[in-house]
Image: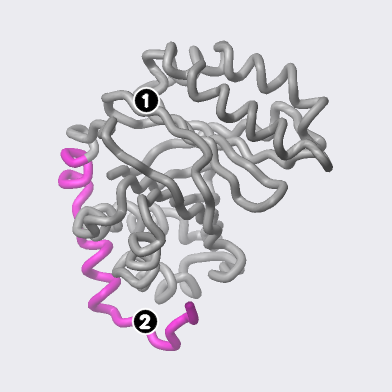
């Protein structure tokens, strides 16, 4: 996808015009659908330009109404990692659904406004196609999350994938872990994305079996992994 040379003001107004009140009600009513059959996804990490942080946040909040109109976008999460760093993670059953999203209104708006809002954003680099290795869902309002990106040691990709598959059964016994995804970004890079209703649920997960197993096995199967790779995130909006 190429950046548009001109940004249509009307498109920006449409997105940023969604009120916080409307978003809050949508988020309050959000529960996970356990029937989802998510196989592939997209992971986008972006950095707001200095002074543009609130505009990026409002842009993401406004995106919720657009993805709600995309029937083949199964799940969509807008999140914030730190003051300047934001992200989008979304899932699909088929490549057809993913391509429809990439040609849809959210992607068009992101590309149209990236030059004004984002620092050094490159769609070919920063919009990552991912495969979903495993997932687990429970009902509940999703407000907080974790994003863990990890690199397999040479020759250890199978061990990492086995670990992630085992993690699915472990999080099944964590009632406060609402959504949990094991993701393959490329041949050596993997990630875990999970969500919780509150800090208590997230803290319980961080003290649970999956986190303990990750820290125990990391020196053997992961390249240069330490606890700083476990990033706490705020879920701004979700479908």
SS at mark 1 in the image: strand
Q: Residue at x 57, y 67 (%)?
A: 121
Res. 178 mark: 1
Image position, residue 2 (x, y; %): 49, 81
- Asked if 40 appears above or below 116 in the picture, the reply is above
What residue range appears in magenta?
1-26
Q: Is residue 170 left or right of residue 195?
A: right
SS at mark 2 in the image: loop
- Asked if 207 appears above or below 195 in the picture, the reply is above
Image position, residue 177 (x, y; %): 41, 21
Judge the density around disc 1: few (<14), some (14-19), many (≥20) Cα neighbours within 10 Å: many
The image quadrant of residue 141 is top left
Image position, residue 61 (x, y; %): 30, 52
* Residue carrying label 2: 7
Of 168 and 234, the residue lying toward us: 168
- Asked if 73 appears above or below 192 in the picture, the reply is below
Count the marks: how many? 2
Of 51 and 222, the residue lying toward us: 222
**Which quarter of the rendered picture does the C terminus lie within?**
top left
Q: Is residue 227 left or right of residue 94?
A: right
Res. 147 mark: none
Q: Residue at x 19, y 59 (%)?
A: 69
The image quadrant of residue 192 is top right
Of 65 and 234, the residue lying toward us: 65
Q: CA distance from mark 1 to mark 2?
A: 38 Å
User: Which colour scheme appears in the figure?
Assistant: one colour
């Amino acid at each position: 996808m190429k950046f548009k040379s001109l940004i249509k003001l009307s498109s920006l107004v449409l997105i940023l015009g969604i009120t916080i009140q409307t978003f809050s009600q949508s988020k309050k009513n959000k529960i996970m659908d356990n029937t989802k059959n998510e196989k592939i996804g997209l992971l986008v990490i972006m950095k707001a330009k200095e002074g543009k942080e609130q505009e990026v946040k409002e842009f993401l909040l406004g995106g919720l109404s657009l993805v709600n109109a995309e029937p083949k976008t199964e799940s969509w999460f807008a999140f914030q990692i730190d003051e300047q760093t934001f992200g989008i993670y979304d899932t699909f059953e088929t490549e057809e659904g993913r391509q429809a999203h990439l040609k849809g209104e959210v992607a068009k708006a992101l590309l149209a406004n990236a030059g004004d809002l984002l620092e050094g954003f490159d769609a070919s680099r920063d919009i990552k196609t991912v495969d979903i290795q495993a997932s687990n869902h429970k009902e509940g309002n999703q407000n907080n999350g974790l994003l863990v990106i990890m690199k397999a040691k040479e020759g250890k990709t199978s061990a990492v994938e086995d670990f992630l598959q085992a993690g699915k059964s472990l999080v099944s016994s964590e009632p406060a872990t609402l959504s949990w995804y094991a993701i393959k970004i490329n041949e050596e890079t993997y990630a875990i994305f999970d969500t919780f209703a509150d800090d208590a649920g997230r803290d319980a997960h961080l003290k649970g079996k999956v986190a303990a197993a990750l820290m125990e096995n990391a020196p053997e199967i992961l390249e240069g992994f330490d606890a700083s790779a476990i990033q706490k995130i705020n879920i701004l909006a979700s479908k």
